[in-house]
Amino acid sequence: MNVQRRATAALLFVPFLAGCAGDRTPEEDPARRPNILFIAVDDLNDWIEPLGGHPQARTPNLSRLAAQGVLFTRATTPSPSCNPSRTALLTGKHPITSGMYSNYQWWRDVLPNAVTLPRYFADNGYWAGGAGKIFHNNQPDPGSWDDYFPSLEEHMPSSPRPGGEGTVNMPGFPDMYGAFDWAPLDVPEEEMGDHQSVAWAIEALEREHERPFFLAVGIYRPHLPWYVPREYFEMFPLDEVQLPLLREDDLADVPERAVEIAHRGGNYHDHVVAADQWRQGVQGYLASIAFADAMVGELLDALDASPHADNTVVVLWSDHGWQFGEKEHWRKFALWDNLTRVVLVFRVPEGTAVLPGGTPAGRRSGRTVSLLDLYRTLVELAGLPHKDGLDGRSLVPLLRDPDAAWDRPVLSTYQFGEYAIRDERFHYIRYIDGSEELYDLDADPEEWNNLAGDSRYAAERARLNALLPTDPAPFVDTDYPLMPHHIPPLRGLDDYLERKAAGARR
C-alpha cells in the first residue's frame, strides 16, 4: 500500500484498525478456549423475522438465535458479490486493500500469501473443519482446513433439480445463466446438498474433540436456483404472496450509471415481468429462506444437545443482500442498502475469558459494522494471538454492550471504483463516473428519494464523500475464464468510458 493509499485507508478504516488493542496475547490465553460454530447463509437479505424485511418470512430458528444473542441491524458487506465479500471476510482484507473486486477473479491468485480465518485458528491449536459454501463456489482453499465435506477439493455438495438440467420457469432468456429459476422439488429433504452439509457438521458436533474446533457450515439456499422441497413452497400460497414495496418511478432520480447497473445482464427485471413470474420468484425465495432456517435449526439443536453446548461461540452471517424489482433490479451486484445490508448474529456462552457473562440475550445493536470485523472478533473471543494486517475491528465491545459508542461509517465497493458508505442514518453511493446518490434511511428506508443534489444535505454528502478512498488497490487480473453470460469486470474509469462509447455491456 503506497503512502497516499495508506493515508486514505487510515481515515477510512477508523472503524476497523482501532480494534487491534483488544486482541489477546498468547500469555493471556485461557486454558479452555471456546469452540466456534461459523454459519454462512448465502444470498440472504433482511427477509427474516428478526429484521422484518418481509412480513411473510418464516424463520423461527433465526428468531431463536437472535433471542439468545446479539443481532446487528446495520451490518454491511464489503461487496455485494459472493467472491469479494467472502474473500474479504475470510482474509480480513477489504477489496480496496487487496484488489479483489469481482466474482470473476481467482481470489487465491490475488492474495497468494493470505492466512485465512480458519487457517489462523488451525495454526493456533484448533481443529478446522467445514462443509458447504464458505469460500466462493469454484474456489475452495484446501490449505485452510483439516477436513471438509464433500472433500477438501470440492466444497459444494450437489442438489437435485426439477426436470433434468434445464430451467423450469425462466427458460431461454438471453444473458441469463441456467440457475436463474425457481420451482418446488418432490424429493426428500435428505437429498438436498444443504442437508448433507448440515448432517456432516452435526456428526462433528456430536464427537468429542481433543482440540477446540472451528466448524464452518455454508448453507447455499437462498442462493439461486430456488429449488427446495415442495413443503416449503406450500408454506407460502402463491395467491397470498406479497411483493416488496415498490415505486414505479424509482429510477427517475438516479444517475445513468445506476440505471445501467439496475438493467445489467439483459435486464432481469423485464424478463421476470414478461414471464409473469414475479410473485413466483418471491415465493421461491421465501421458501428457500424457510428451508435454510430449518437447516440452521438442525445445527442449533445438535449443538445444544452436544457436549460442547456451554463452550461454543455461534456466529451466523450472510454474504450480501438481494433485490426483487426494487429500482427495476433483480439479484445482487449493486450498492443499494438492501444489497449491502447483511444478517449478522453472535451468541457467546457464559464463561469465556473475554466475555465471562456471555452475550446479553435478545439484544439488538444498531451500530454500523462490517463482515470484515468477524476475523478480529473471533480471534479476540478465542483468546488467540494478535493478528497483524487485518482491516477489520473487533466487535467485542458491542457484544458486551450493543449500545456502546461506535459512530464508525462502513464502506462497500462494487467492482473497481464504485462505492457505498453507510453510517447510522445516511447511505451515500458514488459511481465510477463520479455520479452520486444519497439517502436518509431514517426518513426513507426504501431509498426512494435521492438527496445527492439537494443543497440541504450538501454537508452530509461532502462528509461521506471525504471518507472514500482516493487511491484504492487496482483490479488484479487473474486470467479468470469468462463465460458468455458473464459481464467482464471493470478495471477502471477508462475501461468504463471505452465500453460506454462502444455500447458494450458494462
Image: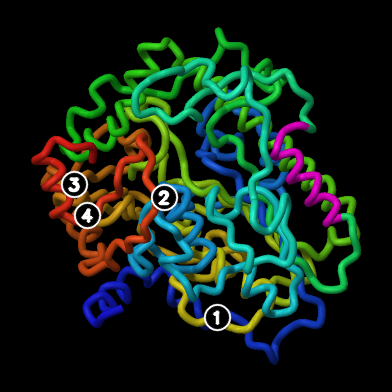
Q: Give, as a three-letter code, the residue at label 3.
A: Glu
Residue annotated with mark 4: 460
Q: Give, as a three-letter code, the residue at label 1.
A: Lys
Disc with the residue nearer the chain's start (4 vs 2):
2
**In 3D space, how far apart are the residues under numbered discs 1 and 4 (Cα atoms)?**
35 Å
Percent across and percent down for residue 176 are: 39, 28
Query: Of discs 4 and 2, which sits in the foreground?
Result: 2
Percent across and percent down for residue 270 are: 32, 19
Query: Dots 3 and 2: beta carbons under 8 Å?
Result: no
Disc with the residue nearer the chain's start (4 vs 3):
3
Element class at badge 3: strand
Residue annotated with mark 1: 387
Magenta highlight: main SS: helix
Residue sitting at x 38%, y 40%: 483
**In 3D space, how far apart are the residues under numbered discs 3 and 1 (Cα atoms)?**
36 Å
Percent across and percent down for residue 240 are: 56, 11
Quadrant location, the C terminus: top left
